[in-house]
Image (cartoon, rainbow, N blue to C red):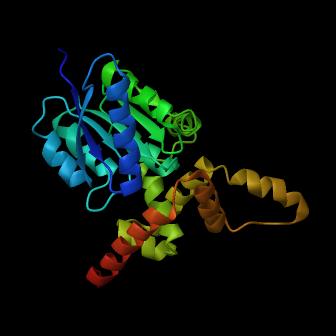
């Protein structure tokens, strides 16, 4: 008899956890092969990592936002040690900030998936089958336009541009950014100019100029970033904590 596929489920929300387990166990009962899945359910990335590190090729379904260690941090740790690990990210977030973070850590030949929690169980099971059984990457159709944008060099935000975006979203002046990032003021302005180009803010200036109107570029950059999902309240809250720590440790 075929051995069941051992899955790690990392999810802290009780309702979502129940949905996942119910869907997968229902698949066991309806399948011609009994015990298709053996489930190991944990509440955060740390617990998932402790299980996965003892497996040859871990198969993980992970939420993105979890306490102590989120899904991206879990993936980064696991893929560093086991690049063949397969991870299906199951989340309510389609923000570009997460797609961007993932794109920078995914090993070149790794099989992974990304599916939104708004999907019915049938779509979830399809993604599970493709990623874990058929070794195919599966990206939620709602995510693909965002993923495409992160891969376009003309529009993709670099790490340095992202840093300065977070800093202006937190309200830092050029002088404060320069101090925090060990830059000259001209260096800060150069990064801002590059960010504005990527966010295509010059078009706003051009379209408004015939009317004698101008926009505040910093505010406009943050507004566009929020619309694109490059920043969100959850990640800004974390950035705020890091900023307060910097204030405390900086003369």
- 84 vs 220, nearest the viewer: 84
Question: Horizontal and vertical percent for residue 165?
Answer: 51, 61
Q: x and y percent of residue 215 in the render?
A: 74, 66
| Quadrant assignment, res 249 | bottom left
Nearer the observer, 70 or 51: 51
| Residue at the front extreme of this rendering | 29
Residue 247 drawn above or below residue 42:
below
Q: Is residue 97 something one can see in this rendering?
A: yes
**Quarter of the image containing the C terminus?**
bottom left
Residue in view at x 41 percent, y 54 percent: 15
- Tell me residue 211's x, y (percent): 90, 62
Q: Could you say which quadrant of the image residue 144 lies in?
A: top right
Which residue of the protein is positioned furthest toward the left in this rendering?
Answer: 54
Residue 51, located in which quarter of the rendered image? top left
Is residue 187 in view?
A: no
Q: Quadrant of the N terminus?
A: top left
Residue at 34 percent across and 71 percent down: it is 242
Residue 182 as seen in the image, left or right of residue 127: left
Rendered position, 222 above or below 96 = below
Q: Residue at x 40, y 26 (%)?
A: 137
Count the marks: how many? 0
Q: In the rendering, at what x and y percent does residue 146 appear?
A: 56, 40
């Amino acid at each position: 008899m075929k051995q069941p596929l051992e899955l790690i489920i990392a999810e802290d929300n009780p309702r979502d956890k129940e949905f996942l387990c119910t869907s997968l166990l229902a698949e066991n009962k309806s399948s011609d092969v009994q015990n298709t899945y053996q489930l190991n359910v944990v509440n955060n990335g740390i617990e998932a990592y402790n299980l996965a590190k003892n497996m040859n090729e871990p198969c993980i379904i992970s939420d993105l936002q979890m306490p102590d260690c989120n899904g991206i941090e879990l993936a980064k740790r696991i893929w560093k040690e086991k690049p063949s690990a397969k991870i299906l990210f199951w989340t309510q977030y389609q923000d570009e900030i997460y797609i961007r973070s993932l794109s920078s850590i995914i090993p070149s030949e790794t099989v992974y998936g990304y599916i939104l929690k708004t999907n019915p169980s049938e779509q979830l099971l399809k993604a599970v089958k493709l990623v874990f059984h058929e070794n195919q990457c599966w990206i939620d159709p709602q995510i693909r336009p965002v993923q495409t944008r992160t891969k376009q060099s003309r529009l993709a935000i670099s790490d340095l541009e992202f840093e300065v975006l977070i800093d202006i979203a937190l309200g830092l002046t050029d002088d404060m950014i320069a101090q925090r990032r060990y830059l000259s003021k001209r260096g800060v302005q150069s990064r801002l100019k590059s960010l504005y180009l990527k966010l295509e803010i010059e078009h706003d200036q051009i379209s408004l100029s015939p009317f004698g109107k101008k926009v505040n570029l910093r505010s406009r950059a943050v507004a566009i970033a929020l619309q694109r999902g490059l920043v969100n309240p959850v990640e800004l809250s974390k950035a705020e904590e890091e900023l307060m720590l910097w204030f405390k440790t900086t003369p």
